[in-house]
Amino acid sequence: MKKYFAFSILILGAALLVFGCKKEFPVDEDGLLITKREECFITDLDLLGADLQTVRTGATIIDTAALTVDVTVFFGTDLKNIYPVFSLASDCKLEPKVVGRTDFSDMANPRKYSVVSGNRKIRKMYTVRITVKQ
């Protein structure tokens, strides 16, 4: 009798494992949840220096119509060694990914980042412009 009971539990567990773990929420190639949200925009950007302290001198100015982000940094900031910290709308992701320090020293050619919506169908290209305070 114990054999049949153990076998029944084993069969029931296998059935729950196969049929109970249905993928209701899809994920993208980064393992992030794909949702129905269509909004995609940058809400804030902070720039950190080598000591992981902010190098911004004031508020970040984000123009969601022109798709620009303007930041002023302290005089003497090492623009080749900045760590950008983006804040995005819910469920969005940033491309290219920020994986470490970024070189912002070529001020004639500002860096560009795409913000991708939660449903992964809408993409907006933002231009990040940095100004050094005099």
Image (cartoon, grey):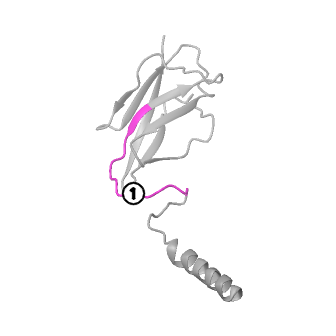
Residue 108, image x and y in percent?
48, 30
Q: Nearer the viewer, residue 129 or 119?
A: 119
Q: Can you give x and y, in whole percent of width and height, for residue 62 in the image?
A: 36, 31
Location of residue 12 with respect to 116 vertically, above or below: below
Between 33 and 39, the one nearer to me in the picture = 33
Residue at 44% from the left image edge and 67% from the top image edge: 24
Total numbered badges shown on the rendered structure: 1
Which residue appears at 66% of the width and 85% of the height? Answer: 7
Residue 132 drawn above or below residue 86:
above
Residue 102: x %, y % from top left = 59, 34
Give the residues in magenta: 30-44
Chief secondary structure of the magenta portion:
loop
The residue to which callout 1 is attached is 35
User: Is 94 left, or right, of 38 in this rendering?
Assistant: right
Which element carries disc 1, helix, strand or loop?
A: loop
Q: Is residue 65 magenta?
A: no
Relative horizontal placement of residue 131, taking residue 30 as reference (left or right): left
